[in-house]
Amino acid sequence: MAAFRRLAESTHFAGLRSSSQEMSTSPSNQISRRGYHIDLGAREKALLEEDPALKRFKSYKNNLKRVSKIGDVLTILVVAACTYELYAVATVRKDQRQQH
């Protein structure tokens, strides 16, 4: 513990500590932390409006969700089939050992 305290008090780490303290008290950091609201300009508002030319691509999201769900179901089925196959092989071997 004493070694850590000496390390923290060394000049190298003291410089880092003072620079981080300066950064945290700068006005720009205080403004961003307070989260002042700035109204959007005309360009930003235009960019956020819905574009009718892009409407046909919205179905892409639904298709992606559907394919993802199908993939999840297939993964579960494959894992279940492999587990069953391992169980079946294990029980067959167990039965063969008991017969001999």
Image (cartoon, helix red, strand yellow):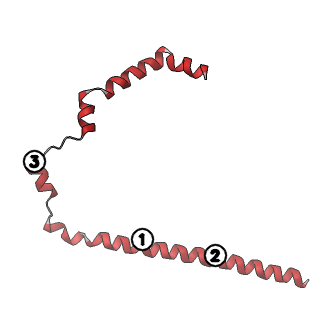
Q: Position of residue 59 (x, y in %)?
A: 27, 73
Label 1's element? helix
Residue under numbered circle 1: 68
Q: Disc 2 marks which amino acid?
A: Cys
Whichever of callouts 1 and 3 sits on the residue coming sooner in the sequence is 3
Report which quarter residue 81 is drawn in.
bottom right
Q: Is residue 23 left or right of residue 85?
A: left
Report which quarter residue 92 is drawn in.
bottom right
Q: Nearer the viewer, residue 4 or 74?
A: 4
User: What residue is at 42 percent from the left and 22 percent from the top?
Assistant: 16
Which residue occupies the extreme left position in the image?
42
Q: Disc 1 marks which amino acid?
A: Ser
Q: Within 10 angstroms of label 2, few (less than 14), some, or many (20 or more) residues? A: few
Residue under numbered circle 2: 82
Residue under numbered circle 3: 41
Which image quadrant: the C terminus? Answer: bottom right
Q: Disc 3 marks which amino acid?
A: Gly
